[in-house]
Amino acid sequence: MRLLDQYVGRTVLISVLMVSFLLIGLDASFAFLAELDDLKSNYQAFEAFMYILLTLPRRVYEFMPVGTLIGSLIGLGTLANTSELTVIRAAGVSIARIVFAATRPIIWLVLVGMILGQFIVPQTEQFAQSEKARNLYLGESIGSRDGYWYREGGQYTHIQVVQPNGVMFGISRFLFDDDNVLIRSDFSERAIYQGDHWVLEKVRQTRISDQSTESEHFQTMRWEDTTITPQVMSVVVLKPDYLSITGLYQYASYLDSQELESSSYFFSFWKKILQPFTTLVMVFIAISFVFGPLRSVTMGQRIMAGVIVGLLFHYAQQLLGHITIIFNLTPFLAAAVPLVASFLLGVYLLKRV
């Protein structure tokens, strides 16, 4: 029985890895072609290639559930086409045992995905985004289409590039008085965090009064009265889906304490928490399909079914996420409903068998 478990598990694992490699390769290739449209003087094909390379951990993490579903359909479908599943069932092996054998190697992939999502993806994604923005917009003032706005009292700050090592590039600051009249603006090429404060470098400052304007240049300047820290900016600059589980929870709790909108961050938090279960449920769905409606169809039809189910799951989860934000519903339900529905569908199909 142990050899049988290893054989089924190995077949499923190889198929999942091959499908995941194909999906990630196609996605990265199309992303690279899209990046070629953004080429500028300091952002050429090599920089675009490095950007895509740094985003590969995120793509692996994102495609893991769909790759598991399609790969499991192909692996188990191959066993079904060669009548090996029929022989296994005729030998008295239960469907529950086959589910266990197919799921066991996927658990290791789930553990790899958890490590990627928690420790690797946030770091590589922030570095990739910051390097791309630095190459595209370094030296420009407020003219770039990207960047991050931050408001503290009467000061509005626009930051072009945020690096994970406590360095920012392209900082534009605008200070308004109590009557919302602009009284000072400046642009700094770089800012370095010095433990408890920022030091601005190569500052071009303009002071505005009723009668005239006065411009000055400074090699360095201390950034006074700001609560911006590298930790805060590392969360702000990334999309919620790219953050770690702990980072999502901390920032969402902070937004909640400030009575700000936090649903999108809590939704991403619960989606990441449930992703390991999502990946395992995809194996369960594949088994129920192979023993049920896809028992005697071609491999192409199985692949198409896997793609359709994977897309339906993805878009259902995204739709429920937007509904949660609009109607202020519980983010946990939005993340859990597609998962529970997929599991119940698999149970229903296996019961019919």
Image: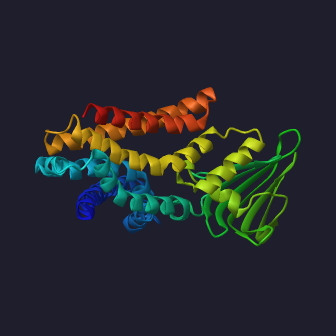
Q: Position of residue 126 (x, y in %)?
A: 55, 61
How many numbered badges does the structure rendering display? 0
Q: Quadrant of the N terminus?
A: bottom left
Up-down: is 264 above or below 235? above
- Whether residue 132 appears in this view of the structure is no
Question: In the image, 135: left or right of 194?
Answer: left
- Whether residue 10 appears in this view of the structure is yes
Question: In the image, 321: left or right of 2?
Answer: right
Q: Position of residue 347 (x, y in %)?
A: 35, 36
Q: Residue furthest left?
A: 82
Colour scheme used in the picture?
A: rainbow
Q: Residue at x 68, y 38 (%)?
A: 261
Q: Residue at x 51, y 32 (%)?
A: 320
Viewer-nearest residue: 70 or 102 = 102
Q: Position of residue 262 (x, y in %)?
A: 66, 41
Q: Quadrant of the C terminus?
A: top left
Viewer-nearest residue: 2 or 121 = 2
Location of residue 219 by image quarter:
bottom right
Viewer-nearest residue: 9 or 246 = 9
Up-down: is 94 above or below 234? above
